[in-house]
Image (spheres, rainbow, N blue to C red):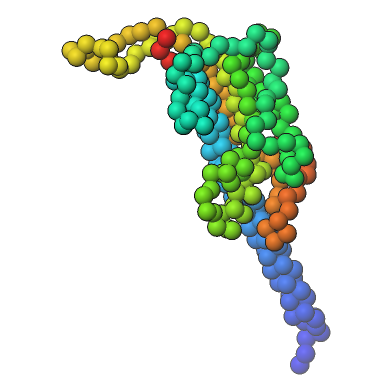
Amino acid sequence: MKNKNEQGFALVLSLVLMLAMSLMGGALIVISAGDHKSNNNSDEYQQTFYVAETALIEGEKYVLDRFLGPWNTATHKRDTAARSLPANQTAVFNGTLTRKNYQPSDSFYFNTNLSCYNSFRDIDKTNLKVVAGESWNFGDVIRDSFQGATTEEKQEAETLKGYYYEYFITRIGAAPFRGYGSSIKKSATDTGNDGMAYRIYGCGIKALGHGYNKSRNQHNVSGSETMIVALESTIVLPK
């Protein structure tokens, strides 16, 4: 004997179960997409951090190059007669950096503007004077360093054109210096001398709107957001 109260129960139960499974599936997709985006952001931050470290290294190299004597690319020797402890420029620094290996006309160009300068809030910007300030496109630096690169390596360099490293250097003043040298007595292990201190402010910048289509060999830059990692270091050179 059929119970009229049970008519359609199986159908209703099936619809409820289907709805529950659809909601669970949708939730899993949302969670998975969120994890994927989080991983991408983490990877981009890590890369931007490495680019910021490059900025510090290049800033230190800038000071050392002038301290040891500018490198002559024609003779492949240093001009030791021009050795110096670089001094700050006379004008107060306004945050404008010199573009070294890219121009606004480049397809990958992204205007970093005063992004690095504004990332350091503790600087006395009313009196800040610098030795130099430079902006470099990281992807172009990598591309130019390749010798006999494969197509895949060249494409990888193209994807890195969304990254920039920038630095500016200020001469702080006299500081204690301890180091080793041939003029030190054999019985001595180290010595204290007067030195000159320099502070390097470096940034890694990722243009979040930057994209590169490998199949079309085209760059796409859109949006105004940037990811910035700001670092700083201090070096002391002997007078």
Quick check: can you spot residue 39?
yes
| Residue 222, percent from left and from top | 78, 44
Q: In this view, does 138 lie to the left or right of 113?
A: left
Residue in the image at 46% along x and 15% along y: 81
The quarter of the image holding the C terminus is top left
Residue in the image at 71% along x and 26% along y: 114
| Residue 58, percent from left and from top | 53, 30
Nearest to the observer: residue 206 or residue 70: 70
Quick check: can you spot residue 233?
no
Residue in the image at 58% along x and 40% along y: 141
Residue at the bottom extreme? 1
Q: Quadrant of residue 208?
A: top right
The vertical placement of 21 against 212, above or below, is below
| Residue 41, percent from left and from top | 62, 45
Q: In this view, does 154 lie to the left or right of 11?
A: left
Residue in the image at 62% along x and 54% along y: 155
| Residue 159, percent from left and from top | 64, 49
The quarter of the image holding the N terminus is bottom right
The vertical placement of 24 against 120, above or below, is below
Nearest to the observer: residue 175 or residue 217: 217
